[in-house]
Image (cartoon, rainbow, N blue to C red):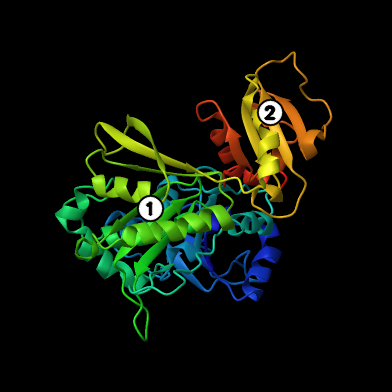
Amino acid sequence: MELLIEGGLWQPHWLVALQAWRGQGNRWQLLQSRRGGRYPEDEVAPWVACPPDGTLSASALLAAWLDGDEAPLMAKDPSHQILISASCALLTLAKESGLLTLGPVGADLTLGPNDDLADVLGRLLARRLIIPELRESGASPAPGLVLRPLRPEDEADIAHYCADAALARYTLNIPHPYPPEAARDWLAMSGRKAALGLGWTWALSLPEDAGVAPLIGVISLHWNGELAWWVGVPWQNRGLATRAATLVKSFGFERLQLPALTARHMPDNLASARVMGKIGMRYIGRRPGADRQAGELSHWRLDCPLMVAEDVRASLEPLLADPRVVVAIGHGDWTRGREGAPELALFMDDTKSVVGRDADRASGLIVRRHPLSWLAQQGPLAWTHKHGVLLKERGELGLGYLLGLLDPASAGNRPG
């Protein structure tokens, strides 16, 4: 990892944190700007006890990013570089280039003059996701599909497939004509997305006997459970998207414990609709699109299944049938078929009913009833509902509540 620190922001109390950073095998570069960072030869720089590994000019860096060139001294994976700056222009362009950012205003995390640099760096780096390799298991006449992390070397394959008008026509975020630098920028943003805990992206590949197989498509999973994918035109109509989505579905429900998966597509993209149906999603209607999408988009959803014994399921039925119950969430290991006390949170529409009283153990269930207002305010027991399974909801109140508990932007403010 490497820090790019604007000299004018330097604080003496950062020295210990930087020395520890260097001791962990990391680097830091001094970013010289008009705000500071240039010291006369007869004046001792405040960072002399931990000198930088190099220097960069803030104006040269800004010019390189504005021109769309690869900036000097940039790492192969820009998400492993962190810019510390007070310049809104630099922070914006750094984000677009895939870097992480710290600063007083407009950065990924706020770093003020009195803040502990080690603490803020720790919170930023704790958000980084590991992209695991996902493989198909079992015997099959077709080659086993492997979803692997993206590599810088994938740029050429991404540019090749995305330049095809037949692919861009049915995708939401691939422009046509495809700009020459778009693949590099997309790879940088995918790395930044994972580094900020916002989602996972894999390359679809069919490995051969040796070496890393080339990319033939891409599939991603946003932190909120939204799936998106594309497969290169020569590889379409072979079931690869369905197989990839099946692998990611298992990852999302079993390893991430997401409450639901969602996906959307252009209404005339029937191929994507078939994939969504094959992995068990249900069509929930059309909604207005955004950004470059005109008109409406078709939306699909698949809730995490409840894995419990039939007698427990039967005991749930009268509770869920109560018309006062607006949202019901099963939480704890029992919802995933593992050992654990069956716990149920009921959000009640009737404030005069038994709201907020102690748990009762009717039919072996630990039932707690909460006011409906908790869905917006996240009451004192909200953290226990994280990774819960939705059993009933009105509209998307329950899903919105559970996703709020998983939001990377606010996760550090809650226990659990």
User: Closer to the N terminus: mark 2 or mark 1?
Assistant: 1
The x, y position of residue 91, in whole percent, is 45, 50
Residue farthest to the top, as pictured: 352
Which residue lies under the disc numbered 2? 319
Residue toward you, 254 or 224: 254
Q: Residues within 10 Å of mark 2 (few under 14, many from 20)?
A: some
Q: Find the distance from the CA under tag 2 to the CA under tag 1.
A: 49 Å
| Three-letter residue code for mark 1 | Glu
Q: In this picture, is 385 found above or below 57? A: above
> Position of 273 compared to 127: left or right?
left
The x, y position of residue 150, in whole percent, is 40, 67
> Position of 363 compared to 301: left or right?
right
> Position of 253 compared to 170: left or right?
right
Q: Which quadrant holds residue 58? A: bottom left
Q: Which quadrant holds residue 321? A: top right
Which numbered marker is on residue 96?
1
Q: Is residue 303 visible?
A: yes
Residue toward you, 311 or 345: 311
Q: Is residue 60 visible?
A: no
Task: Tell me the quadrant of the picture where the N terminus can be found.
Answer: bottom right
Residue toward you, 188 or 202: 202
Q: Residues within 10 Å of mark 1 (few under 14, many from 20)?
A: some
| Three-letter residue code for mark 2 | Leu
Label 1 residue SS: helix
Residue farthest to the bottom, as pictured: 210
